[in-house]
Amino acid sequence: MSPKRDIQPGTLALMILKTLDVLGPLHGYGIARRIEETSRNQLSLNYGTLYPALLRLEQEGCIKAEWGPSENNRRAKFYGLTSAGRKQLAREARDWHRTTDLIAAFLTPRREA
Amino acid sequence: MGVLRQWWTRLVETFRPSPDQGDLQAEFAAHLEMETAENLRRGMDPAAARQAALRTAGGLTQAAEAVHDQRGIPWLEAVIADLRFALRSLRRAPAFTLTVVLTLGLGIGANTAIFSAVRGALLKPLPHRDGDRLLYLRQSRDGPGGANLSFSVPEVQEIREGAPLLSQIAQHSSWTVTWRDRDVTERVDVALVTSNWFDVMGLGVIAGRTMTTTDDGPGVPVVAVLTHAAWKRRFGADTAIIGKRLQVDGQAATVIGVLEPAPFFPGQADALFNMVASPHHLSASMLNDRAHRMTELVARLADSATVAAARRQVSDVYAQAQRGFPVAYPTESHYRVAVLPFRSVMGERAGLTLGLLMAAAAFVLVIAVANVTNLTLMRGVRREHELAVRASLGAGVARLRRLLIVENLLLVLAGAALGAVVAVGGTRMLAEFVARSSPRAAEIRLDATTFAFALGLALLVALVLSFAARLPREGRVASWILAGGHRASGNRGRSRTQRTLVVVQVAVSVVLLAGAGLLTQTMMRLSAVSSGLRTEEVLSVTVPLLTTPQLLAGPAPDIAAKIRYEEMRRAIAAVPGVGEVGLGSPGPLRSSTLRFDVKAEGIADVPGMSRPKAELRTASPEFFRAAGIPMVAGRPFAATDRRGTAPVVIINAALAQRLFGDSDPVGRSIAWAGDLLRFTPFSGEWRQVVGVVGNTQDGGLDAAQALVVYHPFNQVLAISGTFVVRADSGVAQLAPAVTHVVRRYAPDAPIEAVTTIAQLRDQSVAPRRLNASLIASFGLLAALIAAVGIGGVLAFSVSARTVEIGIRMSLGADAGRVRRMILAEGVRLMGAGVVIGLTATWFAAGLIRELLWGVAPRDPLTLGIVAVAMTGVGLAACWIPAARAARVNPVMTLRNG
């Protein structure tokens, strides 16, 4: 097993928002699972990272939590995107693209004309 | 926005009771279970599946903590916890808390109130434009009435020409006009000014216009600028008044503007008029005569000039004038001119008193803080055990210090809150008090700055308190814990601090009490001074029948007025209940502004000695009887002493002594003399002395004994007339009837100062009484706090020495011996404090010399009483702990100790 990478600061919120955007309301386990899968198991999320981030997003009004039945009929807390969260996601995604483009442009060796 | 919302939610969460922990646990459990189920589905055996799920989860406790930290604001929670703890521990010691809060509240409150008064009356920049460049010039000479002579027009001209460092000089003359407004006629204080007064003072108008040079000089219309206060009071702050006409001294004056609000100095004024309002001010005598001094000077310092340079220039000009006109400036009178910054001259009278109060309040605060420090120290000792336990449970020194700081902050802020309440009341009271001596009293108010002062003071106190308590050095907590198990009896360092603080308290209290004692003595001696006349059941009513121009116009209006005065006098005498009615001017217990040189026939002037200056007063035949002034020799005036008959005078005993020594003055002749007489309607003819009356203290009970010459009321011009009404009883109730009679005879005349002589007399003592009672209350407060302090320290010492006392008693010391031992300890502390306090008083007493009267600053009697009183109070405070020590049960203490 290759060593798992830590999450880069600031990116977790974006990942959570995107996950909820794609899959709809989801519980903490589902979110962690999805992020790990999407990262092809390069990332691992322990509770101490995931749950404060969820609480923070909730405090910012980006997501909303509700108790509900899970797939195997257990009670679980489901997090869903709010309209503010959707806007936040769009904004952060745009910013992120811009940043990566910029960094990529710097890192690509420039061909002299 | 998201960030703001996040912090807001967190702030709210911080103060919410902690949320259901079960909720988070359930969420974690669900997570674990789902992950375990997934692992099972992948084919792990149950134990491994759960293990793997737990591994991914990381530490569950840390996770819960991380969520908790994200939920609230951790450091704020810590502070709140500290606050809760502090509140709890203060509630457990209510006596301590109450004492500290009260002491600090009074100390902080008094200081804040006095600071606001000092700031308003002395420190704040003037509202005048470039107020720091404003100067006031004052000419004075030795002798009564010489403190402020003002200037004559020729002197003004010389200074204007010879002192270019004063860029502009404005003339200002205080004046009284008879002002008729609708149906009310009254005499009003106003000022006559040159048009450049506004530029010099740096004051504009809030409505209308200021005066211009076209308003100066003779032959122009009379114009008036109302002062802001008078505009509000008289005209309800209505700008429609501008352009309207006022009736003053029987002529019309147009209101052209309203002055912006500013303290008025010198004197008081409801309005400013141009010089033409008073014909006298443009007369040849006023304009040309050097000795005719009626003008005050305000000047603006030229740019880049210093006050010192301007002062030199003015004194050069003045020296030249003195050389040129030696007769106008007799050398033995020491004529001099002072050039004073306007702001300091405005605060001149209030400054000393306010400084004294400020010092007293600061002293009280020092004592209060010393006392609270002591209480905190003692409490710290009692709590040592508790702190040691806390330290052993893992609280670091920094943490303990923080606990102490939070606790002290809480105490001090409660004190500051109480102080703010005290300050609100105190400031209002002080503003009234200061209004007697400063034109700037209206500027005294509590504002953000004064509250910041109070808060700063409180925080400083909290810091002092927090660092006075002893805490172990980091790393030595363990040894401290061991020591904490014992009673902390043997700590020499701390007990020395406590003792020093007590000595300081006693010393400072002694200084304050000495000040209070001296001022109280002053007040009592002053109250005991005889005014020289009867004060009970005598009423005075002043009725000025003539306006100033009429007075200056010649004898005809005066003769007509005298007839009306006599008619009124008879009518008042006919009012039921009235005993005797006299007429005079000025009224009793009011000082006369007319003061001239006097000479006696057959007595040569002594070269190099100036002639005595006497007050000119007038009196009707009944005046002395009505006012209760005793005839010492000769006869009172008779109805035949009037215009056209032989000129006669009555002099007071002081003048008789001064002029004639022990020989009989009756039948001798005296005359007015000197330069000033030229400008007055009074002649320098010889007048025969027909009687001598007792001395009176008309200039105030603390004034130097005035020399007085009385003229018959009907023989010379009388400036206004005052009825002196004596009754057998209830004279104050006669006032309406007397006023009614006056109204009938003089419907448009102003009626002033309807007051009993007792009230007038009291006005002379009242400011001193207020001084004395303010300082005395500070002194008593200080002594009380010091007594609590000394008692507390002894009580603590007793409880720390219980074992020692037990041993002593078991070895044969009886209760009396133990009591004496403890008392002796108190007496040593008291003695040191009293001695230091008396020494400090000895050196500092000179500072309040000016506020004293009839008592020396180092009055041994006062100092002795203070020392005895302080020792007495202190001993009383020591008695309680001494008695407790004497009740110590040796068996009990030795068994438990």
Image (tube, grey):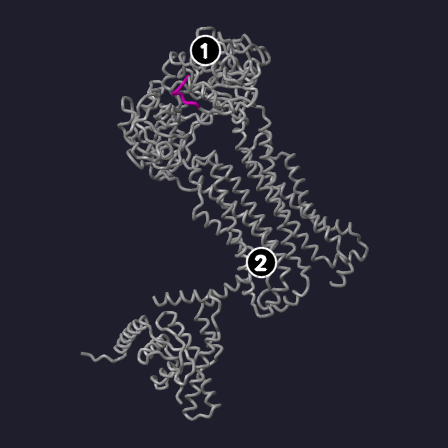
Residue B742 figure quarter: top left
Vertical relation: B761 (above or below) B603: below
Label 1 lies in what chain?
A: B
Vertical relation: B590 (above or below) B413: above
- Most common SS among magenta residues: loop
Q: Is residue B585 left or right of residue B274?
A: right
Dots 2, 1 in contact, CB < 8 A: no
Q: Residues within 10 Å of mark 1 (few under 14, many from 20)?
A: many
In the image, farthest residue toward the left: A113
In which quadrant of the rendered image does the C terminus of chain B lie?
bottom right
Q: Is residue B327 magenta?
A: no
**Which dot, 2 or 1, sits closer to the camera?**
2
Label 2 lies in what chain?
A: B
- Give coordinates of residue B685: x percent, y percent: 45, 9
Q: CA distance from mark 2 to mark 1?
A: 80 Å
Q: Is residue B682 visible?
A: no
Are marks 2 and 1 in one subunit?
yes
- Give coordinates of residue B574: x percent, y percent: 50, 15
Q: Which residue is denoted by mark 1 in the rendering?
A: B715
Q: Is residue B292 left or right of residue B832?
A: left
Q: Which residues are magenta?
A: B745-751
Q: Is residue B863 visible?
A: yes
First of labels 2, 1 by sequence position: 2
Q: Which residue is denoted by mark 2 in the rendering?
A: B90
